Image (cartoon, rainbow, N blue to C red):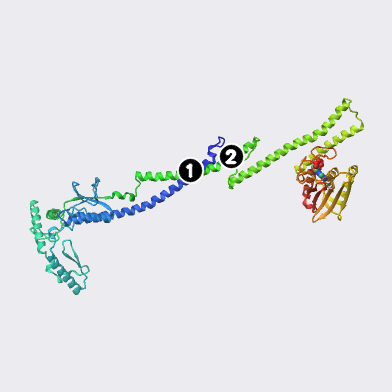
Amino acid sequence: MRADVPLHRSLLLRLLAVSVLVSVCSIAATAWLTVRSTTVAIRQEQGQALADDARTYDTLLGYAATHPGWDGVGEVVHRLARETGRRITVTTERRAPLADSDAGPPATLPARPTASIDPLHVDTATPDHIDPRAVGPFLLPRNERDALRSAAERRAACLRDNFGAVATIAYGPSGRPVLDTRGARPYSEARCASTVLDRPTATERKALAVLQKRVSSCLARRHEPEVRLNLDFTWTRVAAPVPAEAGTAADDASRGGVVSECVTSSRREQLSPYVASPALLFISSRDDDRSTVFDLSPANQARVAGVAALVLLITVTATVMAGSRLSRPLRALTDAVRNMEEGRAARVEVRGKDEIGMLAAAFNAMAERRERLEELRKAMVGDVAHELRTPLSNIRGWLEAAQDGLANPDPELVSSLLEEALLLQHVINDLQDLAVADAGELRLRAEPVDVTDLLAQVATAHRGGAEAAHVTLLTRAEGRPRLVADPVRLRQAVGNLVSNAVRHTPPGGTVSLLARRVGDDVVIDVTDTGSGIAPEDLPLVFERFWRVEKSRSRSSGGSGLGLPIARKLAETHGGSLSASSVVGNGSTFTLRLPVPAHAWDRSEA
Ligand code: ADP
């Protein structure tokens, strides 16, 4: 990069800044959207995981409540793990493994278990914190269940038939049916009473008696009056200062508290041989399942950062490549312009047809034109110097000779010197005319012109010269063509053509001037029977200072500006000047001028 382009103005840097900004914005937007949508997914996932964990816990708690040990739990653990897609580990309270859903090395257990499984000390469930599924000795044998079921069905039928009450039968954990008689009036149950259903079965009586014994001894230890237990573990006071009164754990706050403590502890003692020992439950995600874990762990953060860095790297590389492709030709152009300023050749390589390629091509064309003009200018200055030097050195030579007495300043010498001075003045006048025309400052005094008269005037002016050269000068007009033009300038243009024709026509030849209307134009032809011009020279005769015969002989040499001036005058009038020639036969110069005045009267001062 060149030192003179300030860094913050550098095309490449600005391009880089824009693309980095764009990519950072798009990465941020994508990341934000991803995080939002994943957060929703994570929440749903977590909700499902919580529901799965609750089901696992409940199922294992149920197993513990209905089995005296953990021996057969493996199958249940495997089924749950399969259904939830999680790793399930059950250990003793001392963390000795009881069952693990996954084979292989034992799981490294977290400090806190997911839950502890103890059916006799459950957090929620019933007020006594004993899982209702733990029924122990109250589990009914098949015959008692059948008897109770048929009694319940009979009672439901009685209620339906007599009172239209809909009673549904549900079965408790021990197998005892429970009749739901919602909607039936209170006395209706008395009418459909069932001794089988309302009394404990033999199994229940036996279990209740054992429990009663434990409760009584507990109360005795605490010096509390005795109570009688019901099948639903409520109790009735037996020995009381007031007649027997029913109480529950809830409504007897002071003394009932002790009773319910005794009932609960006695029940735990009675049930403990029937339930599994307390255990710890660990639920964790599977080892091979890590990919589905949506968290922004350091590894995930590194991954996100890595992808972002990669995107940035690609963007920066692409921008640097595109930017240098863009700035390289621009720098080449700048170098070329500097070369041009310092006058050296200036060209840039044109690659492709894009905007920069077009700029390079346009620059090359401009540089070429500029070089051509520069060459022309140099040649012109050289030519002008040359044109002036020849007559001037002639004059000086003769004057020095006269001064030294070598030449006699007789009338012949004086007229020769005058001729050289006139030639000098002629060149200077022509140059001035051209310079004025080039600058677009040539003033035309337009007026109606009769072309036949104008040709006659020109012929008269050149007749002397033509006769001296033994050349016949003829004028002719078809009709009487007229136009609006500057007569002085027009005479000058036609005069230049006629003097050229006379000079290039050998004695005995003819120069004819013909004027005619062609469409909207007036055309003047100056035709001679002279030497003619070679086809390759024809386009060059209108160049300044260009001559077929390079030596400037007095007979044929003019200033070399006659034709360029004539063409310029024609163009200023809105017309044109062209030439055609056959070597050895002669040449025709054709001046074409438009008739409508408005075609050129703008240049009228
Ligand atoms: P010059 O003053 O030398 O005549 P011009 O610009 O008038 O300059 O003409 C340029 C050159 O064109 C002349 O030197 C001559 O060689 C050639 N030329 C012009 N008119 C004729 C003509 N009628 N016949 C042959 N050659 C001509």
Identify the residue under disc 2: 332
Per the image, label 1 sits on a secondary structure element best described as helix
CB of mark 1 within 8 Å of CB of mark 2?
A: no
Q: Is residue 168 above or below residue 95?
A: below
Q: Please give the residue where the numbered disc 1 appears in the rendered image.
A: 317
Horizontal and vertical percent for residue 406?
Answer: 88, 26
Identify the residue at horizontal 85%, vertical 31% (top origin): 395
Which quadrant holds residue 268?
bottom left
Q: Residue furthest front?
A: 584
The percent coordinates of residue 533 (x first, y second) are 79, 45
Q: Residue at x 28, y 50 (%)?
A: 286
Horizontal side, residue 506 vs residue 41: left or right: right
For label 1, the crowd category at 10 Å Cα-Cα, with few meaning under 14, some 14 to 19 and many 20 or more, is few
Q: Could you say which is closer to the camera, residue 526 or residue 168? A: 526
Q: Residue furthest bottom?
A: 161
Q: Which mark is residue 431?
A: none
- Residue drawn at x 32%, y 49% is 290
Identify the mark nearer the N-term, 1 or 2. 1
The kind of residue tagged 2 is Ala
The answer to whether residue 126 is visible is: no
